[in-house]
Image (spheres, rainbow, N blue to C red):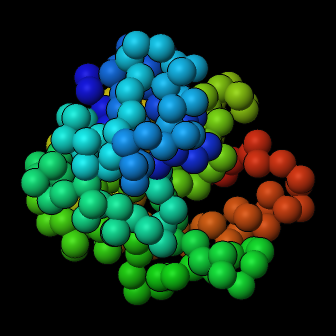
């Protein structure tokens, strides 16, 4: 599959590299076609890796990942171009974090709204699935780093077909079906995004991001 990854940070690089290891062709998108971080990532990942602008990555991908900073996500998707997003699945791993007042960051939207919903409203023909935003990026692509993968990943989205495709990607990353919890429509992203304040404080208390939540019932 051709997959576009929007964002050149650690999350985008980690997800993009794992997708290539699984046999997919991946184009990493950034504001410019010659982004240095993207070029380094391409050099490390071989012939199935390429880079371009956000617009080029969105046009390339049959499926897309939003790995940008939440505060910039809407702007990035506008640069990607609505025509390049139309009808595609976007797995949104971003969070609406505001670092302007230092650490720990606050949330730019919460309680009655979420970034996932804002993206869906702004691009109604895009099929947004919120997932993987409640953990460190290493666990996103390799859940078996902890407890033989026996912990929880949440998923939110309005389009059932899109969630089927997202689930397939999660399975390929190593997530067990019984640990993928579909919370419902995209409005449920409010809950997973609001996990970030406790997640960040847990990271601070433990001194590591290598942990995850597990739902026990």
**Residue 32 visible, this angle:** yes
**Residue 153 visible, this angle:** no
Tell me if residue 41 comes above or below residue 32 in the rendering: above
Q: Position of residue 183 (x, y in %)?
A: 39, 58
Q: Quadrant of residue 79?
A: bottom left
**Is 64 displayed left or right of 41 in the figure?**
left
Q: Residue at x 70, y 62 (%)?
A: 199
Q: Residue at x 58, y 72 (%)?
A: 97
Tell me if residue 174 comes above or below residue 121 in the rendering: above
Q: Position of residue 154 (x, y in %)?
A: 47, 51
Q: Looking at the picture, tell me which residue is in the foreground, 5 or 191.
A: 5
Q: Quadrant of residue 64?
A: top left
Q: Looking at the picture, tell me which residue is in the foreground, 217 or 107.
A: 107
**Is 166 displayed left or right of 160 in the figure?**
right
Q: Residue at x 76, y 48 (%)?
A: 209
**Is 54 displayed left or right of 8 in the figure?**
left
Which image quarter holds the N terminus?
A: top left
Q: Residue at x 50, y 37 (%)?
A: 38
Q: Position of residue 120 (x, y in %)?
A: 25, 67
Q: Quadrant of residue 168?
A: top left
Number of numbered labels in the structure image:
0
Q: Position of residue 193 (x, y in %)?
A: 52, 68
């Amino acid at each position: 599959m051709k997959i576009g990854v929007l964002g050149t940070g650690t999350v985008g690089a980690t997800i993009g590299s794992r997708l290539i290891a699984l046999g997919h062709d991946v184009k990493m998108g950034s504001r410019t076609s010659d982004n240095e971080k993207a070029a380094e990532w391409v050099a490390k990942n071989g012939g199935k890796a390429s880079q371009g602008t956000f617009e080029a990555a969105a046009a390339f991908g049959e499926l897309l990942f939003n790995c940008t900073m939440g505060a910039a996500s809407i702007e990035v998707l506008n640069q990607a171009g609505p025509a390049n997003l139309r009808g595609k699945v976007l797995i949104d791993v971003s969070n609406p974090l505001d670092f302007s007042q230092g650490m720990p960051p606050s949330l730019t939207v919460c309680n009655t709204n979420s970034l996932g919903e804002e993206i869906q409203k702004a691009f109604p023909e895009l099929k947004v699935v919120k997932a993987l935003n409640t953990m460190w990026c290493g666990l996103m692509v390799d859940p078996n780093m902890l407890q033989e993968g026996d912990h929880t990943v949440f998923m939110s989205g309005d389009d059932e077909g899109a969630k089927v495709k997202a689930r397939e990607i999660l399975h390929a990353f190593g997530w067990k079906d019984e640990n993928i919890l579909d919370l419902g429509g995209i409005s449920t992203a409010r809950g997973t995004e609001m996990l970030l304040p406790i997640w960040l404080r847990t990271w601070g208390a433990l001194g590591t991001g290598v942990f995850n939540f597990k739902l026990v019932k």
